Image (cartoon, helix red, strand yellow):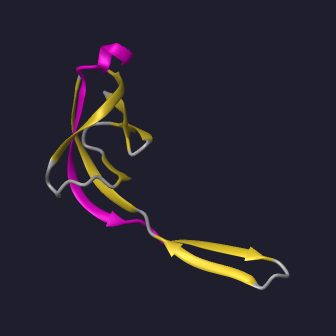
Amino acid sequence: MYAVIRTGGKQYVVEPGQVLKVEKINLPEGSEVELETLMIRNDDGSVKVGDEVKNAKVKATVVRHGKGKKIIVFKYKSKKHYQRKYGHRQHFTELKIEEIVG
């Protein structure tokens, strides 16, 4: 069984027991969260989409918060003596998918 969820403006395919990094969610570590479900595929191969998944839930637990790898942003204009370099580290939340109820 797997499901497609939406969080942080992105969509993810998840299964029970999976650990997943998503955009930062402001919840303390160890708390439970229910994620918006877009689609569910059962073990027998049936697929539920749209109004069929209104009551479906994907329950996850917040494992930890952190920062991703540093990305270097470098801007340069030739012949104008313009250079700008800075870094960025995106915040993330690590979730463990506990169960899919559909």
Identity of the residue furthest to the bottom in this view = 81
Q: Quadrant of residue 56?
A: top left
Q: Is residue 81 left or right of residue 19?
A: right
Residue 77 in the image, given as x and y percentages of width and height: 78, 75
Residue 70 in the image, given as x and y percentages of width and height: 48, 72
Q: Which residues are magenta?
A: 42-70
Q: Is residue 20 magenta?
A: no
- Vertically, is 77 above or below 34? below
Q: Is residue 57 magenta?
A: yes
- Vertically, is 10 above or below 45? below
Residue 46 in the image, given as x and y percentages of width and height: 36, 14
- Vertically, is 49 above or below 100? above
Number of numbered discs on residues: 0
Residue at x-position 56% and y-position 77% = 86
Residue 42 in the image, given as x and y percentages of width and height: 31, 20
Q: In the rendered image, which quarter contains the N terminus? A: top left
Residue at x-position 35% and y-position 58% = 92
Q: In the rendered image, which quarter contains the C terminus? A: top left
Can residue 49 be seen? no
Q: Quadrant of residue 75?
A: bottom right
Can residue 41 be seen? yes
Identity of the residue furthest to the right in this view = 79
Residue at x-position 25% and y-position 55% = 26
Q: Is residue 80 left or right of residue 3?
A: right
Q: Is residue 96 left or right of residue 20?
A: left
- Vertically, is 75 above or below 55? below
Residue at x-position 24% and y-position 60% = 64
